[in-house]
Each structure stands twice: as structure tokens, then as C-alpha cells.
Amino acid sequence: MINNLLRRGLPALALAALPLLTTTAVPASASTRPTQASSPTTHSPARSTGGAAPGAAGVRAPLPLFEAIDRLPVAAEHREGYKRDLYKHWNKGLNSGDGCDTRREVILSEAVTAPQVAIGCKLTGGSWRSPYDNLVVIDAGRLDVDHFIPLAEVFDSEQTPWSAARRESYANDQASPDTLIAVSAASNRSKSDKDPAEWLPSDGSYHCTYAATWVGTKLRWDLAADDAEVQALLGLAEDCPTTTVVYEPAL
């Protein structure tokens, strides 16, 4: 199970020449993430839905970022009634018998250098690249698994109220490479529940990928965007002329 999960991680060679320092930013020139994404996800290429064969069931052809933004339903947000526990997480993950919940499975899958896994899915060692701030993290305890569209933003953006099952599916979605992402705890706390009109990653070279992944995830889950959010995304798209979006609609 652990080896299978690691298929989603970045190639270890990407960090071969880099110091593994929890709080040290990696120079943009050393990053494995291009400034402009060829699909919504470049933080973990092996996980991208863009690898599917053209015409595969449920898989969209690559869309220019502007066109993808244009497909977003536009609606005002509605926060009243939101509670985080409406979105049950973390569940038992892809393998209910491996002792690792969804959160730890994502952390394992995105490791650049695999950690050791003890009973109870306790992780020691390993290394990860946090794309929001371009840091190399060498302590799994300093990672958060972020819902790319924050749970409160999902609630704001549901066009009709979701069932409890659909909310749990989103909150633990490993069928897409983009819904969940391991990042430094500091960058995730900075993001909180903000949308791109309110927050962007400190690593500017990740902005095109961030915009494409945000849009692709909203399209995957049929989530609306408000006017300010759309305008912010369009502004980002101006600087990302070659960026495309690939997404697979959630069932």
C-alpha cells in the first residue's frame, strides 16, 4: 500500500542537490514546478488527471485557463450555517487496513524522500516540497494536508446543499491529484479559508498552477465562484497565457 501511494509523489531526484531544511526556501530555479502549468497540477505530475488518454470517460480535454474560468458558475457566497464538521474527515483512506487515514496517505503519497512508517502510521524521516512557499520540509509534523478549495469555501460555493456523503467524498478526495495537497503548516494557516481574491501563495512561480488547480477543482466539484474571485482569477490568467486546466468531474 505504501509503495503504491508513493507513485503520486515527486521524483526524489528533484531534491538531490537541495539541502533538506524545514524552513529554507528553495530557489525558484531549482523548483520542479513550472511557472505555467500544462494541467491544474504540477506539484505532483504522476497524479495529474491530464495523463489520461484523450476521450477517456469523464476526462475533459485541456482548456485554456481563461476558458476554464468562463465555465465557472457565478453566484454570491452563502456562509450561514457552515460548520467544519459537516465535512467528515479524515476517514480511513484508500486502504482501511493500513492504519493510515486519508491525511497520512496524502502525506506519504507526496513525499519526495519516503519516510519510515511505524505502527499506527507514525512517520519519521522523509522530505516534502511545500509548493505554496517553495520550502523543503523534513518533519511530517510540520505539514498540513490542505483542502485546495477550503471547506468553508466549498460550503459557500455549493450551488445546492450537498449530502453528507458528498461532503465526506470531497473532504477525503484522493481520486483527484488536486483536491488535497501537503503543504507547510505555516502556509496553510496563512491561507485559511481565503479564495484567490484574498490570498495567493508566497511563491509567485506557483501562481499559474495555483489558479489552474483552483479552477479545475471547482469545476470537478461543480462549485460556483463569486464576482471578486472570478476577477482575481482572470487577473492571474493574464500572466498565464499558456496555462491549461484538465479536470475530471466528481461522481
Image: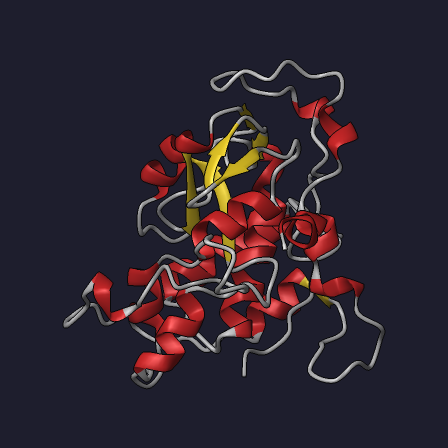
Q: Position of residue 219 (x, y in %)?
A: 54, 73
Task: Name the foreground residue: 217 vs 16.
Answer: 16
Task: Name the foreground residue: 161 vs 65.
Answer: 161
Q: Is residue 193 left or right of residue 142?
A: left
Is 138 rendered above or below residue 223?
above
Q: Is residue 208 left or right of residue 173?
A: right
Q: Position of residue 39 (x, y in %)?
A: 71, 57
One can see residue 148 in this view:
no
Figure quadrant of the C terminus: bottom right
Snapshot quadrant of residue 65: bottom right
Q: Is residue 197 left or right of residue 245?
A: left
The residue that appears at 75% across and 37% down in the rendered structure is: 11
Snapshot quadrant of residue 84: bottom left
One can see residue 108 in this view:
yes
Q: Position of residue 25 (x, y in %)?
A: 55, 19
Figure quadrant of the N terminus: bottom right
Is 112 rendered above or below residue 231?
above
